[in-house]
Image (cartoon, rainbow, N blue to C red):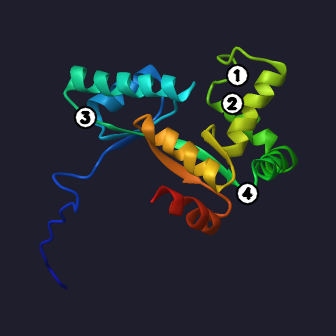
Amino acid sequence: DLKGYHRPKPIQQPFPALMNAGSSETGRDFAARHCDIVFTAFKGSYDEISRQVDAYRTYALRTYGREIQLWVNALIVQDDSEAAAQAFLKHYVDDYGDWDAVDNMFRVMGLEGKVNVTGEALRNMKRKWIAGWNGLPCIGDADQIADELGKISATGVRSEEHTSELQSLAYLVCRLLL
């Protein structure tokens, strides 16, 4: 029988960072009020994304006096050429994509009735979800990916990247960013 006293303390100071994921108005307000990091999605050109990022940060600062980080998802498909990367993207989405899963996701998340697109536009929207959870696309050779990641970074967001060939990404792309 050992008796002891333990008071764990966070490594982060003054406290652990709080993160929220979501992009609805309710989620945005919650994150601006309570969180340090927001994992969200933005749409449009890089200029439009920059304006959305600025508006989000301004809202958090003016409404709640909080400075926040904004993170986004980036879809990375890298190969020796843009054509090869696009072909691989098409192959893994169209030939191996789980279309039933994305249909279920749209239903469960309540997107079916809210999305005002049909036909080929709806299929393309679902392709983005299958490809990389609707991440900002970085598709091409190493130089193109480094360029796209630079553009994403310039919007003021941070990016969480996913790739099927991490060693190749680290060697070919990260060296260009240094």
Work out whether mark 1 precedes mark 4 in sequence or the reverse, and give the earlier one.
4
Q: Is residue 124 left or right of residue 95?
A: left
Q: Residue furthest bottom?
A: 1
- Amino acid under disc 4: Asp
Number of labels in the image equals 4
Contact (CB < 8 A) between labels 2 and 1? Answer: yes
User: Do labels 2 and 3 touch, CB within 8 Å?
Assistant: no
Q: Which mark is residue 106?
A: 2
The residue that label 4 is drawn on is 79
Label 1 or label 4, whichever lies nearer to me, is 4
Q: Cα distance, mark 2 to mark 3?
A: 32 Å
Q: Secondary structure at mark 3?
A: loop
Residue closer to the observer: 89 or 127: 89
Categorize mark 1 by other alpha carbons within 10 Å: few (<14), some (14-19), many (20+): some
* Quarter placement of the C terminus: bottom left
Residue tagged 1: 112
Amino acid at circle 3: Glu
The residue at which mark 3 appears reads as: 67
Question: Is 100 displayed left or right of 170 in the figure?
Answer: right
Tell me which label, 3 or 4, sits earlier in the chain: 3
- Residue sitting at x 68%, y 35%: 105
Q: Nearer the viewer, mark 2 or mark 3?
A: 3
Measured as percent of width and height from the top left, residue 149 is found at: 53, 46
Q: CA distance from mark 3 to mark 4?
A: 38 Å
Indicate left or right for 42 with 99 as reference: left
Q: Residues within 10 Å of mark 2 (few under 14, many from 20)?
A: some
